[in-house]
Image (cartoon, rainbow, N blue to C red):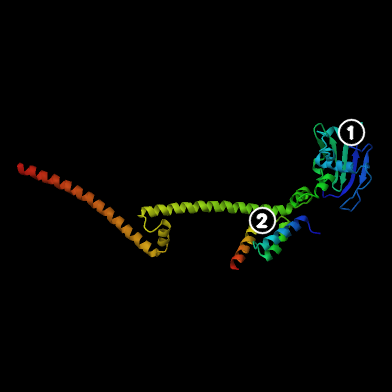
Amino acid sequence: MSKSPLKKLAIEHLRGSVKPFMFTFEKGKKMTFIYGENGTGKSTICDALEFLGKGKVGSLEKRGLGKTNRYWQTLGKKPADVSVALETASGMCKAVVGSAEVIVTPAEKKPLVEVLRRNQILSLIEATAGEKYAAISRFIDVTSAEASEAALRDLIKNIEKNRDVATARVQENLDTINQFWEEGGKVGASSLAWANAESKRDAAVFDTEMEEIGKLQTAYIRIKDHQTRIETAQKKLEIARSSEKEAQKI
Amino acid sequence: MTSPSHELAQIVVERLASEKLITSEDAKKMVGSYAEGKLRQEDWRLALEKGEDKEGKQ
């Protein structure tokens, strides 16, 4: 039920409520017990609260009646004659039968209602622990704890996502190492063994090797350049020699 | 009188502590925030990492 203290419940022409009926809740009590002989209206009060909060009349359901709307009103009355009004500390709200469904005004005052009927209570006797919890869980508000649990679920999702990214990165790195290993002539038993051995080498050695490679590269460029210059000089020399020969003929 | 959320939180943190997923100290500290829905991802992460760290040292 709503957390706002209940004051009064007025029922008009719903089920057994032949005459308009007003039920006053005892002030300052968090729990109300209603007891009485059969046919005195206990179920009608329960139906009225369900009508208001859930837009249905549960006592008529599962009896093979099909759609039960036509049985909601008291005998001899029309659906439009039915009304249920609840007064709480936060105000009043009223439910009437509309063309297709129960209309509650004001909608924001509609109370939270959950009903556990006799047959449901009896079925709990033989129910398993899980079934019992499923039946009564709607009466237990653990939304706050569930909010903390949602944060934990989000954390798990994020960790799983990060793990998947990390796994993909590891695979990428393994592929790269393998590629280097193959380009380097497949030294060692495996690419990882080679990479492991390489990683243990002194970084200064790498620097020296890089420096030597740099020098080699520079030297190569110079040689390459020299080769071009030699070729050009040779061509000039050949031209000069042939010119000389031509001159000697003259 | 404790709320259902508080009772649920108490049961869960005790179980987490008994499984050594979090420390007993953190279990006690977490109950209130857990029940009030104030535990954030980073709070859970810290508690679980501390639990893992302590378990690893034992």
Front residue (pair B35, A69): A69
Front residue (pair A137, A55): A137
Front residue (pair A56, A129): A129
- Measured as percent of width and height from the top left, residue A190 is found at 41, 57
* Quadrant of residue A210 within the rendered picture: bottom left
- Measured as percent of width and height from the top left, residue B12 is found at 70, 58
Q: Which residue is mark 2?
A: B40
- Who's the residue at 61% across and 63% down the image? B52
* Residue A1 shows in the view: no
For the residue labelled by badge 2, is the local secondary structure a helix, a strand or a loop? loop
Quarter of the image containing the C terminus of chain A? top left
Residue A81 numbered tag: 1
- Measured as percent of width and height from the top left, residue A47 is found at 86, 41
* Residue B18 shows in the view: yes
Q: Chain of mark 1?
A: A
Relative placement, left or right, of A212 versus A71 is left
- Measured as percent of width and height from the top left, residue A189 is found at 39, 58
- Who's the residue at 32% across and 58% down the image? A213
